[in-house]
Amino acid sequence: MKMGGERGEMSIPNDTLLHTIQPAATEPSLIRNFSIIAHIDHGKSTLADRMLGLTGVVTEREMRAQYLDRMDIERERGITIKSQAVRMPWQVGEKAYALNMIDTPGHVDFTYEVSRSLAACEGAVLLVDASQGIEAQTLANLYLALEDDLTIIPVLNKIDLPGAMPEKHAEELASLIGCQPEDCLKVSGKTGEGVAALLDEIVRQVPPPTGDPAAPTRAMIFDSVYDTYRGVVTYVRVVDGSLTARQRLKMMSSATTHELLELGVISPEPTPTSGLGAGEVGYLITGVKDVRQSRVGDTVTSADKPAAEALAGYRDPMPMVYSGLYPIEGTDFPVLRDALDKLRLNDASLTYEPETSAALGSGFRCGFLGLLHLEIIRERLEREFDLALISTAPNVEYHVVTEDGTELDVHNPSEFPDGKLKEVLEPVVAATILTPSDFVGPVMELCQDRRGTMKNMQYLSADRVELHYTLPLAEIVYDFFDQLKSRTRGYASLDYHLDGLAPADLVKVDILLNGEQVDAFSAIVHKDAAYNYGTTMAQKLRKLIPRQQFEVPIQAAIGTRVIARENIRALRKDMLAKCYGGDITRKRKLLEKQKAGKKRMKAIGRVEVPQEAFIAALSSEEPKK
């Protein structure tokens, strides 16, 4: 049996319920809940693999690289997209401890996953690559952990690499956290060196969970997945009280009650237990099929003795990028709606609402945390639900004030009002860029080209610089990160967070085919970039749209002013092929007749844009000539 959704490959054996039920809850003083946090590609998943092998929950025969990365996309790209919780036993002296580890993503688009994971822990292992040192996302994740008042254990990974400089980076890490360089543990996730000592330190430094075992039950939902056969599988951290099998549960936000059919721990596959006590992390199955009844951040309590008040929950994430998703086949619209419902269950940062486009039909306007998030969601919809989709050009949310004082939030270029506007506000971000000092010039040039304003610059060491910029969100969501990497040979790193709204000189560029506006190609851009967008899109479409029986003008316009134009020449039949000899007026008469027919055809003709042209025009790649 498959666990659907995020943990696509996590299988529950058909005879799970026939297995011996594990004992009830562990003593809270013997529990340690911790997360592994780091910049992308600093070795979190590899270190987690060594921990799984060392604690014996995964045998050598079962072990594979990136064991906790369940999805095919994660394994193909070599990145973690979803946080994964796993319970591991560890013996220190005479005592047997239960370690609940959560492996987290490193990319800036999945920071919300990290924040939810940290809220279920008391400690965090801050992992730094010993060859690359501290990077932007290292700092961002550290600040998240400090906000939650977690115990930080500094660890240098990849000490077996030839280019590793553990002493140098230990000093950087120690000055950042406020400890001594010798307090930074040195491990190798690849060889396993130092991992046992790290597990001992986790037991020693991370405090046991606090919570009242005698109080009314309160458990926080920090993740969920949808299983086709068993319904919603909910992942919880028990804060107060305890959970037992066949207990009646109440979801506090929706006030719905359900019977608890099965509960257990992930070790690393689902293992049923007879109960979960205060401080433990596990899963619940109630047989609920409605995905809206198990919301991430909700509090689960007992229906018989409910808690007086719910837990604080999580702050809802703000979408950074908006894009329209449309099924190529119109009949797939209900399938797309159900697919988004199920993905929303285990990705609380995804937002969507229905919209209709004259060119693309019915679809959804979706909000994402970044371009990688958009790319992953689209790929998962196509793979897991067998959908063929078109996504429109990504854009951000603007706040528009018209001349009469009306205020609008614009998510889509088609919503941008015509006529005179009093003010247009765009979202800006506070960006932190870490780069070697050799590349400061190219990085500053890139930020200035993208309308950035420098706030400050500081040297972390003799050869590493931290730059702080205020940048328009629209300028960085598309290809800023790629440009940053190419200008710094891959050494720079970027982290950003929303920093309010700022006025900007923005216009809407419309694309017209034969005088008709095509809303899918419209875009809101800065006035200085409008001409470039118009000419680029017109040239793309000239190569992509097939020739018609009449000449088709492609125009880019701001309001009523045309700023760029390309023509698709008409397909012409050789009218003079059978006209030989005779007076020249015979030939002229035939050509005039053809000209009149083309003019009439242009007046009543419609330009059909093929789906391939939409996909190619909205992608960043150049079309083939």
Image (cartoon, rainbow, N blue to C red):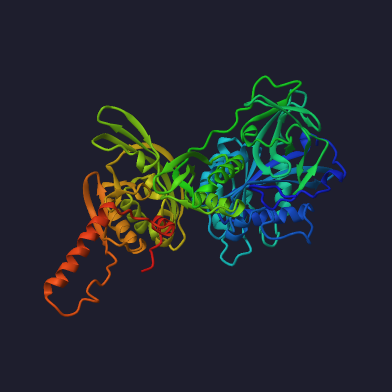
Q: Please, is residue 211 above or below residue 37 in the view?
A: above
| Residue 320 appears left or right of 603 | right
Q: Please, is residue 531 above or below residue 31 in the view?
A: below
- Image coords of residue 339 (percent x, y): 58, 45
Along the viewing direction, whichever of 143 and 105 lies nearer the viewer: 105
Residue positioned 27% across, 38% down in the render: 418
Question: Which quarter shows the C terminus?
Answer: bottom left
Along the viewing direction, whichever of 344 and 218 lies nearer the viewer: 344
Along the viewing direction, whichever of 489 and 414 lies nearer the viewer: 414
- Image coords of residue 250 (percent x, y): 70, 26
Count how many numbered circles sit on residues in the image: 0
Residue positioned 34% across, 46% down in the render: 454
Which quarter of the figure has residue 63?
A: bottom right
Q: Residue furthest bottom?
A: 581
Along the viewing direction, whichever of 428 and 48 lies nearer the viewer: 428
Q: Is residue 186 visible?
A: no
Q: Is residue 22 visible?
A: yes
Q: Please, is residue 507 above or below residue 69 in the view?
A: above
- Image coords of residue 88 (percent x, y): 76, 47
| Residue 548 appears left or right of 315 | left
Residue positioned 70% across, 22% down in the render: 307
- Image coords of residue 549 (percent x, y): 30, 62
Q: Residue furthest front?
A: 582
| Residue 563 appears left or right of 96 | left
